[in-house]
Image (cartoon, rainbow, N blue to C red):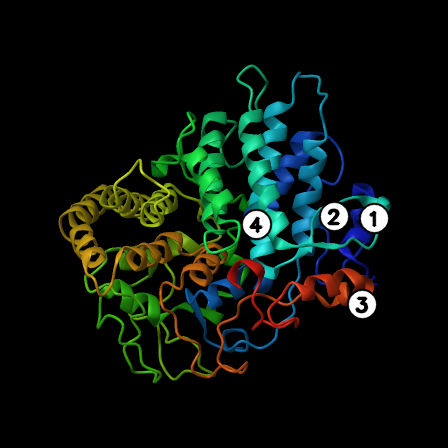
Amino acid sequence: MKKIILSIFILAISLSACKRIDFGDINQDPSVATEGNIDALMRGALGSFGTSGGRVYYSNATLYSQYQAQTVYTQEQRYVQYKGSFYAYYINQLKPLREVYNTTNDVRGNTANMRAIAELVSVMITKRVTDTYGDIPYFDALQGSAELTPGYTPQKDIYLDLLSRAKAARDMFDDNAFVPDAYTDIYYGGDINKWRKFANSLILALSLQLSNTSEAAIAEAAYQEALGNAYGLLEDSADNMVFIPDVTGELPNPISRSRAADFNITKEMTDALKGINPETWGPQLTDPKNVTSNHTFDYRLYAFTQHGQDGLPYGYDSYPQYADDMNDNLDAEDAPFTLFSAAYTWLNRAEGVVLGWNTVDTFDDALENGITESYKQFFAPFSAADQTAAMTYVTGTYIPARKADAADANIGQAQVVGEEKWFALFPDGFAAWAEQRRTGFPELRPAPEAVNGGVIPHRMLYPDNEKNVNPKGWEQGVQGLLPQEDLNTSKIWWEQ
């Protein structure tokens, strides 16, 4: 098949052109609509994002966040300078969503709700892309023939615009406008109240990502506005944003798109869930690997693993031993995949208390609610008896222990919140990787057999095509890194 090496933005001159071009490693997804009505465009884009899998679109982030370890072909978990790819985000997701957003006329009437959903999902996707690479094509992107070699926008400007877009989209929803049906809106089934809650929760996450930057004051104001907004936030796991796979429609669970035999859950994770020897990680295969302060058994071990056994020690070239797998409830082809949760939102509220941004909640209440909703989320597929046992345990044993850890001067609230986010976000490696780079928690150790000087990657490398086809834009992106090199050891703006 002929390969045409072009910038994604040349490729995206028009939707009809997209479907006729072979992008090499990133082809037009056959399940994504490229032209036609806005319902098909929205369903296609939401499905494409939900099912995004493979190395650069899923598994590498789970390696960098130490959720998974590779059993074979272990280069990525040892930090080889692996070239990234952001083409599918732009072609299969952001471009169709832009088409939806730009559509203001429909036979059904006012398109405000369709446009607001498209905008919020675009913000969520763009956050992932910039968190992964740093400066990216943004203001000049998706312009078609008007801009064939777009500039790369500084990450600071991207984030400030994302905050504005998320707020505007939340306020765009209209109770009197038509809503998409469940076939089109595969996340929330057209429930605009849930979308409004998601918008506020997304603003909290965007704001916190700026908490260590020069824009912290703007971020704090955005955080507080969303926290106090009348539409509320995601507070119950029943309101989680969940991608439900459509296997017959070629939209499987994203984890299932990687060969299961090549990955295991990490021993770092299972030791942390078992509460074994807190913070006594060692470099040898047989050493303890608990990278958290947790010293209390966590029932989520049974929800994360298939058999409740040890995971695979992370970051080695080869292994002589068996290790447990991720639970089928999480990685089976038809397993639901949580994209944004109430548990994460409550923990973002707990962090807000730590920062002094949140005076609405108490730390203990927000932490308790975050852990409780995480348990409800992960044990939802289990029997009623198992759910009762888990909730009894978390309420009577685990939550009190974690509150005590947070009150311990040698541990503290920030550390416990960061660690609980690592648990709650499992197995979403992108969100966990972004949180860990920002907060430093959990205190992950580099792969013992790393090949990049022993640095957990701060980013993925830009695609080769960008350097070849859009060298001026690529150079702009590199100049935003510290140091100014297109390497996985260079830091993006919000981490500098």
The residue under label 4 is 127
Q: Earlier in the sequence, mark 1 or mark 4?
A: 4
Q: Determine whether 349 is above or below 22 in the image.
A: above
Q: CA distance from mark 3 to mark 1?
A: 17 Å
- Quarter of the image holding residue 306? bottom left
The reply to whether dot 2 and dot 1 touch (C-beta < 8 Å) is yes
Q: Earlier in the sequence, mark 3 or mark 4?
A: 4
**Residue farthest toward the right in the current orientation of the protein:** 145
Q: Earlier in the sequence, mark 2 or mark 4?
A: 4
- Given residues 117 and 391, the one toward you in this image is 117
Q: CA distance from mark 2 to mark 1?
A: 8 Å
Q: CA distance from mark 1 to mark 4?
A: 22 Å
The residue under label 1 is 147
- Disc 1 marks which amino acid? Glu
Q: Earlier in the sequence, mark 2 or mark 3?
A: 2
- Quarter of the image holding residue 66? bottom left
Secondary structure under badge 1?
loop
The residue under label 3 is 468
